[in-house]
């Protein structure tokens, strides 16, 4: 079986009739704790996973970008640096890449053109942020081909700025940062206020399991924006830019002046920030009981206060919780309203969890859940194998 590098190289040669200079990869990610906290300038605790986007690249002497992917292998997309014309077409995967070069141009940086062939083994729409991995693999390839000497954090910032500015997607920084900065076997505790970060070792007796419910969020952009606006309203009530500087006791004191649902949204964010920091410490100490409790509280908070869960996700959480007790934790992960749960469980319990999910979830819902066993992978880099 050909390796991913061989597959990307083959697609490159077939499309452009020449060999690539190099291959770069960027991983997808999961989030252990800290949901809807990033755009509130709070804390998140993601890890990169062993699914990745791979980009085979060759430098060009002009300022033309030509990109092909394995999902549409017969057509490449082409644009000129600084003339991305994003507003002229309906949404397309290439917008994630065009918005990156547009962000480079907006920052006054100049990149040479490249030909790129992209392949990916990241399950699509399953909560692994394949889009951030795509941006970071491409950004890392462009950075190297053009000798721009951007740091991984700068690549992540450009990716997010491009998405924000040119695609009108107001996502936080979590997904791009983890893909650009992760270390193997580590999670990253990111402070989204100043983008400070520290690596946190994931105990090696724990398995990371992602289970996709088979239910996809409807109208996710609208629901996401609504939650964002609700959080912003509470921050503004306190005369602050974000919820980061509102304490739980401060919030409690003002409960009667706030709409109850706004109070609940803010309580989720504030308590989730505290849980995320505690989870990082608990991971470092290998304190699984504590992780189990924090993940349970996080799920309750997302379900009851942020109202971002659905019955199928709650069911998955119950099924897994019953198997693992306090020898593991489980919670919804990602933007919510559908999607996946994440479980961190002692290795010996992995088979029991998988069997329980496969049998009980199907019996209750008639839906086959997708189970992914993940390991914490390293950040974007050149690959030669
Ligand atoms: C989406 C966004 C992230 C984050 C999560 C919720 O995945 O892309 O930036 O806000 O939702 O935690």
Image (cartoon, rainbow, N blue to C red):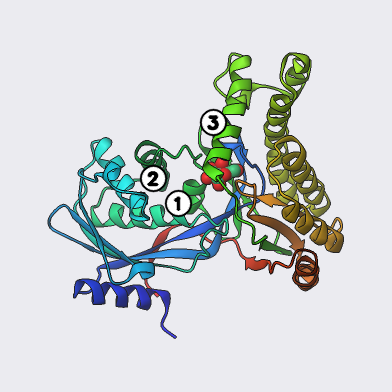
**Residues tagged 1 and 3 counted as in contact (Cβ below 8 A):** no
Which residue position holds label 2? 159
Q: Secondary structure at mark 3?
A: loop
Which residue position holds label 3? 193
Say which quarter of the image contains residue 321: bottom right
Q: Residue at x 71, y 49 (%)?
A: 310
Residue projecting furthest to the bottom: 1
Which residue position holds label 1? 180
For marks 1 and 3, the one nearer the N-term is: 1
Left or right, residue 27 beside residue 198: left
For marks 1 and 2, the one nearer the N-term is: 2
Residue projecting furthest to the left: 62
Q: Residue at x 78, y 20 (%)?
A: 252
Q: Secondary structure at mark 2?
A: helix
What is the distance, in whole Å, between disc 1 and disc 2 at their CAs?
10 Å
Left or right, residue 153 beside residue 73: right
Q: Where does residue 132 sit, x and y in percent of width and height? A: 45, 52
What is the distance, in whole Å, between disc 1 and disc 3 at their CAs?
18 Å
Q: Residue at x 49, y 41 (%)?
A: 173
For marks 2 and 3, the one nearer the N-term is: 2
Neighbour class for label 1 at 10 Å: few (<14), some, many (≥20)?
Answer: many
Q: Where does residue 170 sit, x and y in percent of width and height? A: 47, 37
Q: Nearer the viewer, residue 77 or 175?
A: 77
């Amino acid at each position: 079986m050909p390796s991913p590098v061989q597959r990307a190289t083959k697609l490159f040669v077939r499309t452009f009739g020449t060999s690539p200079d190099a291959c770069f990869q960027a991983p997808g990610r999961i989030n252990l704790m800290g949901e809807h906290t990033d755009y509130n300038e709070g804390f998140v605790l993601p890890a990169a996973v062993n699914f990745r986007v791979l980009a085979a690249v060759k430098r060009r002497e002009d300022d033309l970008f030509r990109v092909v992917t394995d999902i549409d292998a017969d057509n490449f997309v082409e644009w000129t640096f600084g003339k991305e014309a994003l507003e002229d077409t309906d949404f397309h995967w290439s917008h994630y890449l065009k918005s990156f070069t547009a962000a480079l141009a907006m920052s006054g940086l100049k990149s040479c053109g490249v030909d790129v062939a992209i392949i990916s083994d990241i399950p699509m729409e399953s909560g692994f942020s394949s889009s951030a991995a795509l941006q970071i693999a491409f950004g890392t390839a462009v950075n190297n081909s053009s000798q721009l000497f951007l740091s991984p954090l700068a690549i992540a910032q450009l990716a997010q700025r491009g998405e924000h500015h040119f695609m009108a997607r107001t996502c936080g920084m979590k997904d791009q940062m983890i893909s650009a900065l992760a270390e193997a076997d580590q999670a990253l505790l990111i402070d989204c206020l100043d983008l400070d970060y520290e690596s946190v070792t994931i105990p090696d007796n724990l398995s990371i399991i992602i289970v996709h419910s088979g239910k996809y969020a409807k109208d996710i952009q609208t629901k996401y924006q609504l939650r964002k606006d609700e959080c912003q309203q509470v921050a503004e009530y306190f005369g602050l830019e974000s919820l980061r500087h509102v304490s739980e006791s401060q919030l409690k004191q003002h409960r009667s002046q706030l709409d109850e649902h706004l109070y609940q949204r803010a309580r989720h964010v504030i308590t989730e920030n505290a849980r995320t920091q505690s989870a990082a410490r608990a991971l470092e100490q290998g304190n699984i009981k504590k992780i189990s409790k924090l993940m349970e509280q996080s799920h309750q908070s997302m379900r009851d206060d942020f109202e971002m869960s659905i019955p199928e996700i709650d069911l998955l959480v119950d099924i897994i919780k019953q198997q693992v007790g306090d020898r593991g934790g489980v919670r919804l992960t990602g933007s919510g309203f559908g999607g996946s749960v994440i479980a961190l469980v002692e290795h010996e319990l992995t088979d029991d969890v998988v069997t329980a999910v496969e049998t009980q979830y199907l019996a209750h819902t008639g839906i086959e859940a997708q189970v992914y066993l993940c390991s914490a992978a390293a950040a974007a880099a050149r690959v030669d194998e």
